Image (spheres, rainbow, N blue to C red):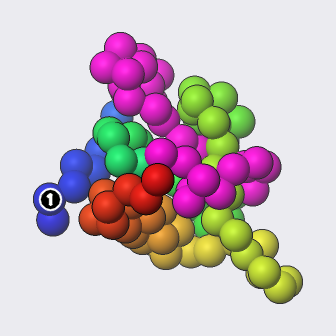
């Protein structure tokens, strides 16, 4: 209830505003080459998450700084969009709660 969620906004404008503020925009995407726990999510960040049937459009994904993939062992290809969002946001919280180890 305390995390900004944007709906029905111009993704082009939002991506531009995030970029101006130095906030990375990550696409939850099957073509992702990074896992969320390999990113530094201790600072401001944003995620785009598509729907279960089609994922993100190519246009929306192209606005992102990089693609992020949630590890999925076994035969499953993807998660429900709300579950994917929860996994990604939990990783943000986890990184911000656990003291950095050197």
**Relative to the observer, which residue lies in front, 30 or 33?**
33
The quadrant where residue 73 appears: bottom right
- In the rendered view, tell whether residue 71 sits above or below residue 58: below
Q: Is residue 49 left or right of residue 15?
A: right
Q: Is residue 64 visible?
A: yes
Query: Is 79 covered by the magenta stretch?
Result: no
> Residue furthest toward the left?
2
Q: Is residue 55 left or right of residue 23?
A: right
How far across and down, in percent of the image, does residue 25 sit? 48, 35
User: Could you tell me which residue is drawn at 44 percent across and 64 percent down?
Assistant: 91
How far across and down, in percent of the image, does residue 28 sit? 60, 53
Query: Is 29 covered by the magenta stretch?
Result: yes
**Relative to the observer, which residue lies in front, 76 or 11?**
76
Q: Is residue 29 visible?
A: no
**Relative to the observer, which residue lies in front, 100 or 94?**
100
User: Could you tell me which residue is drawn at 15 percent across and 65 percent down?
Assistant: 1
- Give the class, few, some or many, for how many residues have Cα within 10 Å of label 1's Cα (few <14, many ≥20): few
User: Could you tell me which residue is drawn at 42 percent across and 48 percent down?
Assistant: 41
The quadrant where residue 45 appears: top left
Q: Which residues are magenta?
A: 11-40
For mark 1, what is the residue?
2
How far across and down, in percent of the image, does residue 58 sit? 71, 36
How far across and down, in percent of the image, does residue 43 sit? 33, 41
* Image label count: 1
Q: Is residue 65 left or right of residue 78?
A: left
């Amino acid at each position: 209830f305390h995390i900004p969620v944007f709906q029905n906004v111009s993704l082009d404008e939002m991506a531009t505003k995030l970029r101006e503020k130095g906030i990375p925009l990550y696409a939850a995407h099957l073509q992702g080459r990074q896992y969320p726990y390999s990113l530094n999510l201790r600072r401001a960040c944003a995620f785009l998450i598509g729907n279960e049937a089609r994922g993100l459009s190519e246009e929306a994904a192209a606005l992102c700084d990089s693609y992020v993939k949630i590890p999925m062992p076994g035969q499953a290809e993807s998660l429900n969009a709300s579950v994917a969002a929860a996994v990604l946001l939990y990783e943000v919280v986890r990184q911000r709660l656990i003291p950095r180890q050197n």
